[in-house]
Image (cartoon, helix red, strand yellow):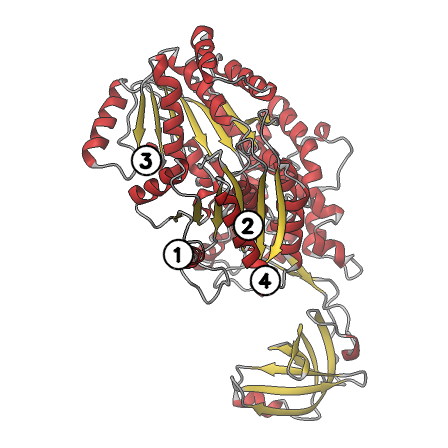
């Protein structure tokens, strides 16, 4: 008789898969608990089995108190030698426990009178908790404990204890108990091996064996490997999870492309005229990537292409060539940028390049006046505007195109994950517009292969001739006066400089100096230098005025926050000072550095750091000094910060894995790409089940 399910169900006789058994079938799970489990994406018994431990605790052995290390989860036994209420910042009950090898303190901030009465000298305890350094040496805060009785010994755990992701109202003990029930059902219900045998190079560990081991590791299990996530059973499941995510992205690609798109044939005459007026030749990399884009646009399926190019590699020209191909076929193109500054720069470039060719360029911004906005919306809907440049205002429902054929999204990582596809239904013929996504933030290979698996990738890996490498130095704030003198000398020689701050307002929490305070200080110290200020809270008109004054040379020094990370192109600027660079990610530092070195003059970037530097801060600055290769920097950034931070908080939804880790498991991705392609073509019937198992009902972009 199966004791794992509530009695009275007929589902057992039909022997369904565990993915079909509702979690409410388990004993003790009513409607209220089921709702709480739903917050953990646990709806079925299979979901429970794939709700894997975050870590493990070893309660299988007693550690001598003298051998306890800081920050270790340990089981200890000993006799209470003293127990008193201590008054300090917080009242606490402190018990001194000894076992003959050493002494440790048990500290309770919340305790009852009855508890205090029982914890008396001479009482023997077995405790479990995490050791921390405290005022009296090593301490356990609020440990779990049992009273030891020589006549009734308490058995130690036989296995490592799993610690699961939890939520309010669902305790670890409840999750362990429910998982026990779920494991007991594997014998009687089907747990499908969804990856076909012929997709593996060698037969993997059976799924059931891997799940049972990870929920119930034996006490001799290598806990170091389990904590690192490198145990073979974890790798077996990590492979399946990454495969499910990869398949979900490819399925999205299939759905988008199934709708079709207008084929946009090359327009060689128009493109030749465009190139002739540029005044410079394309690099080999620009020509190669433009050819890839042109070939995509020529097909009757939506282009889905990501173009990566390091700072200054010339992505905007490539985007303009794509827009010309759309316009030459009677279609419209939309270019979307994350900031007003970058959008304004694109508007200026596209207007300068395209209007001489008879192509009209429109502008849509969230900060436009109502009259101007209405005029632009009318012109876009009528088709009078052929190329429209804008910010996120282009997403909005009221924006209607006459015949949108191409959308270009710049600096994709600045938008939320759903916004990549927000323009997908703007095409007027019922199909999808072609999409070109650009980024000057090189994406580490592992992220490109997973997060952007639905996109074809092109790389512009060559800088235009004449671009001079930026020399980077790290200097302590103690030498600040020398740096100011260097800035003064550069400005006196007719060059321009940036001074980048990480804050706008003074803060006691962060030690970075505010941009406004720095501006005032520099104006006092350098009265003969024209100094401007740009930060994100300024009004658009004021910000634009300062930027224009800097571009025209009216201002020699621009103090700014990181709003100038993208979108500012001043060839005469050859010196950049970045304050407190240790507070920024490597990719952001690299983007900022890319604002200089855009002309022929030798350029420098000074990293004006605080002291002392953390190990990670030192590693970042070393990487900046040693390389100007954005892709090398991107890999180092991923190593130091992890995928969630590299992509930005709005993107972390794309990399929320239960078990897999993109840094640790990146070596699996090439094989996953092969297996995913094979399954889609030869075993498409298992795709939905794999996605459902690992992503549940939250498949990314499920509605596309």
**First in residue order: circle 1 vs circle 4:** 4
**Position of 31 relative to 329 (above/below):** below
Q: Which residue is mark 3?
A: 393
**Disc 1 crowd, CA 10 A, few/some/many (<14, 14-19, 20+):** many
Q: Which residue is mark 1?
A: 516
The answer to whether the residues at label 4 and label 3 have Cβ atoms under 8 Å apart is: no
Judging depth in this view, the residue of 57 and 191 nearest the camera is 57
**Position of 403 relative to 611 (above/below):** above
* Mark 3 element type: helix
* Mark 1 element type: helix
Q: Is residue 183 left or right of residue 495?
A: right
- The label nearer to you, 4 versus 2, is 2
**Disc 2 crowd, CA 10 A, few/some/many (<14, 14-19, 20+):** few
* Mark 4 element type: helix
Q: Which quarter of the picture shows residue 200?
A: top right
Q: Which residue is mark 2?
A: 486
Judging depth in this view, the residue of 549 and 249 nearest the camera is 549
The answer to whether the residues at label 1 and label 4 have Cβ atoms under 8 Å apart is: no
- The label nearer to you, 2 versus 1, is 2
Query: How far apart are the alpha carbons under marks 1 and 3?
Result: 30 Å
Query: How far apart are the alpha carbons under marks 4 and 2?
Result: 15 Å
């Amino acid at each position: 008789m199966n004791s794992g399910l509530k009695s009275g169900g007929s589902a057992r006789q039909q022997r369904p898969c565990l993915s079909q058994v509702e979690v409410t079938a388990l004993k003790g799970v009513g409607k209220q608990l089921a709702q709480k489990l739903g917050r953990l994406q646990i709806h079925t018994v299979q979901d429970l089995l794939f709700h894997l431990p975050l870590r493990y605790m070893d309660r299988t052995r007693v550690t001598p108190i003298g051998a306890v290390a800081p920050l270790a989860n340990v089981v200890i036994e000993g006799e209470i030698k003293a127990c008193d209420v201590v008054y300090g910042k917080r009242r606490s009950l402190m018990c001194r426990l000894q076992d003959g090898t050493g002494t440790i303190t048990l500290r309770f901030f919340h305790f009852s009178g009855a508890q205090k009465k029982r914890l008396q000298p001479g009482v023997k305890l077995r405790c479990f908790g995490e050791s921390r350094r405290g005022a009296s040496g090593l301490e356990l805060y609020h440990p779990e404990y049992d009273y030891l009785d020589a006549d009734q010994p308490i058995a130690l755990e036989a296995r490592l204890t799993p610690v699961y992701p939890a939520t309010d109202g669902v305790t670890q003990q409840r999750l362990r108990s429910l998982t026990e029930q779920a494991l007991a059902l594997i014998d009687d219900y089907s747990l499908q091996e969804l990856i076909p045998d012929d997709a593996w190079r060698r037969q993997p560990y059976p799924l059931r064996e891997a799940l049972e081991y990870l929920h119930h590791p034996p006490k001799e299990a290598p806990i170091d490997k389990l904590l690192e996530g490198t145990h073979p059973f974890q790798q077996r499941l990590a492979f399946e999870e990454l495969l499910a995510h990869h398949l979900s992205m490819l399925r999205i690609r299939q759905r988008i492309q199934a709708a079709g798109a207008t084929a946009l044939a090359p327009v060689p005459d128009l493109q030749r005229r465009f190139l002739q007026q540029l005044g410079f030749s394309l690099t080999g990399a620009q020509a190669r990537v433009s050819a890839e884009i042109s070939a995509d646009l020529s097909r009757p399926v939506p282009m889905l292409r990501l173009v990566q190019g390091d700072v200054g590699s010339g992505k905007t020209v490539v985007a303009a060539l794509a827009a010309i191909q759309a316009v030459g076929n009677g279609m419209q193109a939309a270019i979307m940028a994350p900031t007003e500054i970058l959008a304004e720069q694109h508007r200026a470039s596209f207007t300068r390049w395209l209007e001489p060719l008879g192509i009209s360029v429109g502008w849509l911004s969230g900060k436009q006046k109502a009259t101007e906005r209405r005029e632009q919306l009318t012109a876009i809907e009528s088709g009078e505007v052929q190329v429209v440049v804008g910010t996120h205002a282009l997403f909005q429902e009221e924006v209607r195109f006459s015949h949108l054929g191409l959308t270009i999204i710049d600096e994709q990582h600045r938008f939320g994950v759903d916004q990549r596809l927000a323009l997908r239904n703007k095409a007027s013929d019922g199909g999808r517009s072609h999409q070109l996504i650009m980024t000057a933030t090189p994406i580490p290979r592992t992220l490109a292969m997973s997060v952007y698996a639905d996109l074809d990738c092109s790389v512009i890996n060559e800088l235009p001739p004449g671009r001079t490498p930026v020399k980077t130095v790290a200097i302590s704030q103690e030498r600040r006066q020398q740096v100011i003198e260097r800035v003064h000398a550069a400005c006196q020689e007719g060059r321009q400089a940036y001074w980048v701050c990480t804050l706008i307002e003074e803060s006691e929490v962060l030690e970075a100096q505010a941009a406004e305070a720095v501006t005032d200080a520099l104006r006092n110290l350098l009265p003969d230098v024209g100094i401007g200020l740009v930060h994100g809270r300024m009004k658009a008109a004021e910000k634009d005025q300062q930027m224009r004054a800097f571009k025209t040379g009216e201002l020699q020094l621009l103090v700014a926050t990181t709003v100038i990370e993208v979108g500012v192109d001043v060839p005469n600027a050859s010196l950049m000072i970045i304050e407190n660079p240790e507070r920024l990610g490597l990719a952001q530092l690299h983007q900022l550095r890319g604002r200089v070195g855009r002309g022929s003059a030798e350029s420098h970037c000074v990293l004006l750091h605080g002291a002392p530097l953390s190990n990670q801060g030192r590693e970042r600055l070393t990487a900046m000094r040693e390389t100007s290769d954005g892709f090398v920097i991107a890999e180092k950034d991923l190593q130091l910060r992890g995928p969630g931070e590299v992509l930005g908080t709005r993107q972390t939804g794309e990399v929320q894995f239960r078990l897999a880790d993109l840094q640790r498991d990146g070596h699996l991705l090439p094989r996953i790409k092969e297996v995913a392609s094979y399954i889609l073509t030869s075993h498409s019937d298992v795709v939905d089940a794999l996605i459902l198992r690992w992503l549940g009902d939250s498949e990314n972009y499920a509605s596309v």
